[in-house]
Amino acid sequence: MTEKDQVRMNDDRLGVVLADVGRHLVVDAPTGSAVAPARRAGRSPGAARRTLLVAALVITVVTGTVLSIAPARRVVGGWLRAGGIDVSVDPDVGGHIDGLPSFIEDATPIDPDRASDLLVRPPTGLGSTSLGAPDGWWTVPEGGLLLTWNEDQTSLWIVVTDDHQTGMIDKLVASAQAATAQPGLGDGGLAVSGPHVMQTEHRRVAANSVVAWPDGGFTWRLESVADLDDVVARAESIAASVRW
């Protein structure tokens, strides 16, 4: 079965569930009740409460069902979040990565002394992390500070979390398995394995493996061509070493 067939099957499944639920939204009076079927519009308070209770239960079940289906997650969006970065599932994203620019393509090089202009209180201690001192210092259209290592093979974007509202940064992955929560990183982070798409209010770019986490009023986004386990280890080193 192809991925598109799976999506169609899940959409069909959701339709069947919703149709089945609809048949139970009207609750008949219990057997032996003095309320005749023709008088349902004038139900007793007890019957009305039972109807509302069943309806609330049905809504809860439907909500759980909707969130368990990948296409529905794609519609709802933001099912995994760290700081202002949301992860959403789009099964078709794989066909839209080729030809997209990288995140650093529109970056502007700056003098390291300008870091305080971009972050107000720039972090210290980056040189003591497993990455060592950065090779390049940049700013990007989205704001914040971008640092690079190894000829741009690894980058760390630091931006004040209040500078972008939730949902401003949207990472699109082909399947939910590509993204995992990293609860022990900062205030709770996430990791995305392999190539994916990042959408901002300014542009749409291609990205490699990424670990992102909010901490100290900043959102941190570490991207690298390295294996995801290595990227996570580097992120943990940064989170443990950096001070403000």
Image (tube, helix red, strand yellow):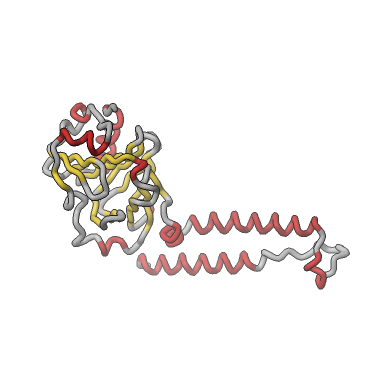
Q: How many marks?
A: 0
| Image quarter (top left, top right, bottom left or bottom right) of the C terminus | top left
**Quadrant in the rendering for residue 200:** bottom left
Q: Where in the figure is residue 9, as x and y percent of width and height?
A: 45, 68
Give the answer, above or below, for where 172 lies relative to 39.
above
Residue nearer the viewer, 168 or 177: 168
**Quadrant in the rendering for residue 58:** bottom right
Q: Where in the figure is residue 213, as x and y percent of width and height?
A: 34, 39
37 left or right, relative to 64: right
Q: Where in the figure is residue 193, as x and y percent of width and height?
A: 29, 48
At 17% from the left and 42% from the top, the residue drawn is 138
At 23% from the left and 50% from the top, the residue drawn is 141
| Image quarter (top left, top right, bottom left or bottom right) of the N terminus | bottom left
Give the answer, above or below, for where 128 lies relative to 204.
above
Residue nearer the viewer, 159 or 214: 159
Q: Where in the figure is residue 153, as x and y percent of width and height?
A: 16, 44
31 left or right, relative to 113: right
Give the answer, above or below, for where 227 lies relative to 71.
above
Residue nearer the viewer, 12 or 128: 128
At 36% from the left and 46% from the top, the residue drawn is 84
Residue furthest to the bottom: 38
**Quadrant in the rendering for residue 54:** bottom right
